[in-house]
Structures are given as C-alpha cells and as structure tokens.
Image (spheres, rainbow, N blue to C red):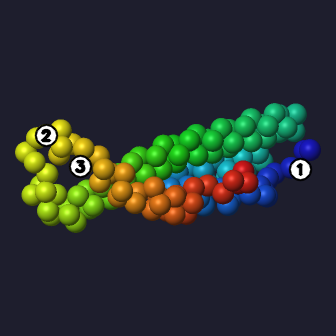
Amino acid sequence: CKRLSSVELVGRIHQSVSYLSLDSWKIGMSEEIDRINDILPSLPAELKTTAIKQWMESVLRRLEHYKHEHHLLLKEAAALLELALWKANLDEDDTLEANVSNLSLDNTSARKQRRVTSGAGVVIKGVLPFLRFAKDSA
C-alpha cells in the first residue's frame, strides 16, 4: 500500500468518544484518532500495516481506559447523590431530633432508617442510565 496516506475510522468509535465525561478525554481521543494520518504519509510502505495495527490498539486501549475512569466517576457521583438525598431527607424532617430520645443509639437507628427511606435507590436507578456508556458502543 504505497499510496495509502490516510485512515478514517467508521463505526461506533466516534459515538463512544462523544459519551466521554471530560472534554480533555474527548480531545485526547480525537488527537489519538487523527495521529495516524499525520505519520502515515511519511512511512515506508512496508511499515504502514504495522503502524496502523499499533495505532488501532492504542486507540482501543485509551478508550477502554477512559471508559473505566468514566465508570469510577459514575460510582462516585452515585454515592454523592445518595448522601445528598439522605441529607435532604434528614433536613426535611426537622422534628427528627425532637422525636428521638437523647440516646445516640436511637438517633443512629433513626438516621439509618432515613437513609433506607430516602428514595435514593429509585432516583439513582433513574439517573444512571443517562450517564452510562451505551452498551454496544465501541
């Protein structure tokens, strides 16, 4: 392939890149995707196949890394959302302290019960599908 001077990716890779949480990740992926077209024209024909293979592996490896980081951010966001809902539920019931005796065990039990009944499970299940990667992306 002496005349091969550029490669264009097709498929779901661009959709997967658009799902990335941070703009810096999107920019990094776009730069990595475009990198092959900067070096390919100057490579000897016998090295082009190897360069394309290494480039494809690099793109996929970087995307998997970002998807993993995205998942970690989602877990952190879900935990923060759960805590915020719990706190809001506690704040909503201003009479909690008045209705619970001064025993810290009773107060702890009441707080745990408020966490269970905060509705976080329902809210988080409704929110996370909008933040996850599509199942069939790249």
Label 3 crowd (10 A; few <14 / some 14-19 / many >=20): some
Q: Is residue 64 in view from this perspective?
A: yes
Q: Amino acid at mark 3?
A: Ala
**Frontmost residue, 119 versus 20:** 119
Q: Secondary structure at mark 3?
A: helix
Residue 89 quadrant:
bottom left
Q: Is residue 42 in view from this perspective?
A: no
Q: Residue at x 39, y 48 (%)?
A: 79
Q: Which one is closest to the eye, mark 2 or mark 1?
A: 2
Disc number for residue 87:
none
- The N terminus lies in which quarter of the figure? top right
Label 2 crowd (10 A; few <14 / some 14-19 / many >=20): few
Q: Which one is closest to the eye, mark 1 or mark 3?
A: 3
Q: Position of residue 44 (x, y in %)?
A: 83, 37
State whether residue 116 is above or below residue 119.
above
Residue identifier under label 1: 3
Q: Residue at x 67, y 50 (%)?
A: 33
Q: Position of residue 15 (x, y in %)?
A: 67, 60
Q: Residue at x 24, y 44 (%)?
A: 109
**Frontmost residue, 103 versus 130:** 103
State whether residue 28 is above or below residue 129.
above
Left or right, 62 with respect to 121, comes to: right
Q: Are marks 2 and 1 in contact (CB under 8 Å)?
A: no
Distance between mark 1 and mark 3 Cα atoms: 73 Å
Disc number for residue 110:
3
Residue identifier under label 2: 104
Q: Amino acid at mark 2?
A: Ser
Which residue of the protein is positioned furthest toward the right in this rendering? 1
Q: Position of residue 20 (x, y in %)?
A: 55, 55
Lower position in the chain sequence, tag 2 or tag 3: 2
Q: Position of residue 32 (x, y in %)?
A: 63, 47
